[in-house]
Image (cartoon, rainbow, N blue to C red):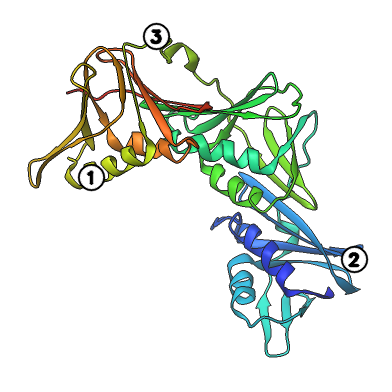
Amino acid sequence: MKIECVQDKLRTILSQSEKIAGKNLTLPVLSCVLLTVEKGHLTVRSTNLDMGFESSVPVKVEEEGVCAVPASVLTSFINNISNEKSIKLTSDGNIFSLTTQKNKTTIKCLPYEDFPTIPELTNTQTFEIEAGDFVKGLKAVWYSSSVSSIKPELASVYMYPEENNVLFVATDSFRLAEKRVKTKEVKDFDRVLIPFKNITEIIRVLEQAQGTVKVSLNKNQIAFNYGSTRLVSRVIDGTFPDYRQIIPKEFKTEVVVLKEDLLRSLKIANIFSDTFNQVSVVISPEEKKFELTTKNSNLGENTTALSGALSGEPAESSFNYKYINDCLQSIDADSVSLSFAGQGRPVVVRGVSDKSFTYLVMPMNR
């Protein structure tokens, strides 16, 4: 291999691929990026066997070739050298060389023949969506996924189509988030469970995309394509709970408050919260009272009164304040509604002018 390429383009593509490279002691080549030069392009690939990434950039080619270079070493070097317009890359046997005006570096390669193939999906269903909309859908719900792998279907983001919408849903059984993303037109596709542990990298890669991304999926994998970039993730084989049956349809009490006021009160709750992050909520529409109380036996206690529009019956309940705080970044509206279905039942949080997002939190034992 002997090429010359633009440093900025190489830096961008390596920073994306390096995060996905695995750290597998039994298969050391997974810690590498596979560099392939052919037809005037350098293609960079990485995989951890759960996800795969590949992307290409045009380069000036003197000699085609393939090599597997340790991802962290190569990326760290490229990120730390001074900005130069171009960089020369060569490989000879098990030695990979990089040359700039101020640096000449050699890195030992691993046998590229051991590098796993990133699968090409077959028997797929496909649809296109704005990359920004897809990222927004994931960000709106993924924090509600379970971090435990005991129930894999809960350690995921559930995605499915409905009319001209793509819905993203996540739950850990204590809270649930649903985001509805409108699209111009989306083809019907099978419901899919995207692993929670892969969501961060999917978001990070797709945030670099501009315009639409092509989504392809089958029963085993999901792939995202834009420009010369392709990202593949396995999907979970399982059935997501019938979550809509637990979302209350009728409510006894409702509060509408400014999102910023609620955020501020939850920050105060954090100061005095106990080890269970419990906040007690008291609502009395007749007295125009909406109060949040937190107690800590070692610190003290605090009660914050909030102004808002209150309606319905008096209500008292307790929640994990972090669960409510988490969802507010997903609401675009200035005001939020908290709807209570009764004692021992969940609270539903929505944006007053943003009906695309629904969030449910189960109460704690008082």
Q: Amino acid at mark 1?
A: Ile
Q: Mark 1 to mark 3: distance in Å?
A: 31 Å
Question: Image quadrant for the C terminus?
Answer: top left
Which residue is drawn at the image coordinates 68% and 64% (left, top)? 12
Location of residue 194 by image quarter: top right
Q: Amino acid at mark 3?
A: Glu
Question: Image quadrant for the N terminus?
Answer: bottom right
Q: Which of the two discs, 3 and 2, labels the residue nearer the N terminus?
A: 2
Q: Is residue 94 left or right of residue 234?
A: right
Residue linked to disc 1: 268
Residue linked to disc 3: 250
Q: Mark 2 to mark 1: distance in Å?
A: 58 Å
As rendered, which of 270 and 17 lies closer to the eye? 270
Give the image location of residue 241, x and y in percent: 49, 18
Disc 3 + disc 2, Cβ < 8 Å: no
As rendered, which of 46 and 271 lies closer to the eye? 271
Q: Which of the two discs, 1 and 3, labels the residue nearer the N terminus?
A: 3
- Image vertical order of residue 89 relative to residue 17, above or below: below
Sort mark 2 into few (<14), some (14-19) or many (20+) by Cα contacts within 10 Å: some
Give the image location of residue 76, x and y in percent: 58, 72
Direction top: furthest residue: 250
Which residue is drawn at the image coordinates 69% and 18% (left, top)? 163
User: Which secondary structure lies at badge 2?
Assistant: loop
Disc 2 + disc 1, Cβ < 8 Å: no
Direction bottom: furthest residue: 102
User: Which secondary structure lies at badge 3?
Assistant: loop
Q: Is residue 20 left or right of residue 364?
A: right
Work out whether residue 147 can be spotted. no
Give the image location of residue 312, x and y in percent: 29, 12
Residue linked to disc 2: 40
As rendered, which of 273 and 238 lies closer to the eye? 273
Q: Amino acid at mark 2?
A: Gly
